[in-house]
Image (cartoon, rainbow, N blue to C red):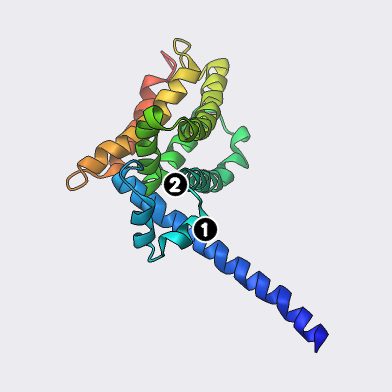
Amino acid sequence: MVFAAMGKEPAKRELKQERSARTRVDILEAAITLFAKRGFLATTMADLARAIHMTPGALYWHFPAKEDLLLAAIDELHQRYVIAFEPLFAHYRSLSAHEQLLAFTRRTHDFLGQHRECGIFFGMLAAEAADSNERVADAIREKLGLYSHILGGILRHGQKTGEFRQDFDPHIAAQGIFGGYMGALMYQNLFRATLDYNPMAAALDGLLANGALARKGG
């Protein structure tokens, strides 16, 4: 009987941990959606608790403060973005810089188009946190800076191979490009009744790869 009871305890703990992990994911999903719609300054922990049919006390058990929840949501979206890009990173070095740029921009606009709340969430947080919460703003800068760094490397490579023009700073251009896709999503969200994101982002893809950055005379 003693050994049987000992065997049941780890199983119960494992089940409890699994339930806790699922609950955490549900909280993050609700938080991302709500923050994307209302912004984090206007969204309270009580709002979040109601959205996921949880008591505020239970929500605070998982996340002691709204800032903790925001930071966890940022990390969650970052992981989703990295997973979406894994197939590209596995073989992108075998591609030309032009092909890398096309692959990166298409993957970016596909991801944002399929996960609208991700781009809007980052856009809303970036706008609000810049003047209100430095810790959250730093977390967003870190993630967006990483994406821009990767894109900047592609642009720099294209300048070295002669595929792209030389008259732009790849680091600054990368930040502008990535910000452009996020901004396009925010813009489209305002006109969502009459404007679709995918063709607008595809037009931006083409302008970047074949026009604005293409080597003159190429």
Amino acid type of the residue tagged 1 in the rendering = Trp
Q: Nearer the viewer, residue 84 or 135?
A: 135
Measured from the top left, where is residue 119 in percent x and y? 38, 41
Q: Nearer the viewer, residue 61 or 76?
A: 61
Which residue: 47% across, 14% down?
169
- Characterize the local packing of mark 2: few (<14), some (14-19) or many (20 or more) Cα atoms within 10 angstroms: some
According to the picture, the residue beneath numbered tag 1 turns out to be: 61
Q: Is residue 205 visible?
A: no
Q: In this view, which residue lies farthest toward the left?
A: 194
Which residue: 66% across, 70% down?
14
Q: Is residue 49 visible?
A: yes
The answer for how far apart the CA atoms under marks 2 and 1 are is: 12 Å
* Element at label 2: helix
According to the picture, the residue beneath numbered tag 2 turns out to be: 66
Measured from the top left, where is residue 21 in percent x and y? 56, 62
Q: What is the quadrant of the N terminus in the image?
A: bottom right
Q: In this view, which residue lies farthest toward the right?
A: 3
Measured from the top left, where is residue 173 in percent x and y? 44, 20
Q: Is residue 142 left or right of residue 41?
A: right
Labelled disc at residue 106: none
- Numbered marks: total: 2
Q: Are marks 2 and 1 in contact (CB under 8 Å)?
A: no
